[in-house]
Image: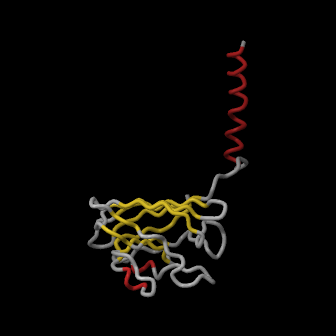
């Protein structure tokens, strides 16, 4: 008797749950985005940057390979265009309105001897939500070395670029 009840219950409930999912009734999870990093001309850097919006901050996880060992700048850029061989099409660093220069930087990405780097950080100067801090459609660029705070041009060659897309 119990087995019949479970079977009948499952047959009745499954279409309702599937229908609710398809209709968008089930509450959505947190906003997510990612940028798949492709190397620029002459480089072999690749990776993925995943982003998850929490209630107040943006969680960023970067996993990159093919880097020269050491510290590298990783930045959000203003344009979501990585089409130029040197990723110059990504434009300058993204700076939300009212945010002082360079305060939007991510921490250094540090590659080990095998060229692998992983970074997990929470930032509050970017968002996946509709606002002036929204970074969907912008890009993430990995640079040749760490930028100096007062000289953005010192961040070196752009090694990889990926457009940030909503997941």
Depth order, front residue of 105/136: 105
Way the structure is coloured: secondary structure
Asked whether, in this view, residue 130 is left or right of residue 108, the answer is right
Residue 103 % position (x, y): 54, 79
Residue 62 % position (x, y): 44, 61
Depth order, front residue of 64/109: 109
Asked whether, in this view, residue 77 is left or right of residue 67, the answer is right
Occupied quadrant, residue 113: bottom left
Determine the residue positioned at 28% across, 70% down.
43
| Figure check: 76 above or below 17 | below
Occupied quadrant, residue 9: top right
| Figure check: 87 above or below 164 | below
Determine the residue positioned at 40% across, 67% down.
109
Depth order, front residue of 17/115: 115
Asked whether, in this view, residue 121 is left or right of residue 17, the answer is left
Quadrant that contains the C terminus: bottom right
Tell me how many marks there are: 0
Determine the residue positioned at 71% across, 22% down.
8
């Amino acid at each position: 008797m119990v087995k019949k009840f479970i079977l009948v219950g499952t047959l009745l409930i499954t279409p309702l749950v599937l229908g609710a999912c398809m209709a968008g009734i089930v509450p959505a999870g947190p906003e997510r985005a990612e940028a798949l990093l492709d190397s620029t001309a002459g480089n072999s850097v690749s990776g993925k940057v995943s982003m998850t919006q929490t209630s107040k901050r943006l969680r960023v996880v970067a996993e990159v390979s093919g880097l020269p060992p050491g510290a590298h700048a990783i930045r959000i850029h203003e344009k979501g265009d990585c089409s130029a061989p040197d990723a110059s099409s990504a434009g300058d660093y993204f700076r939300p309105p009212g945010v002082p220069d360079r305060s939007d930087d991510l921490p250094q990405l540090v590659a080990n001897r095998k060229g692998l780097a992983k970074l997990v950080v929470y930032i509050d100067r970017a968002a996946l939500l509709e606002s002036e801090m929204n970074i969907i459609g912008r890009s993430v660029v990995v640079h040749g070395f760490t930028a100096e705070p007062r000289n953005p041009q010192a961040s070196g060659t752009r090694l990889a670029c990926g457009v940030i897309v909503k997941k």
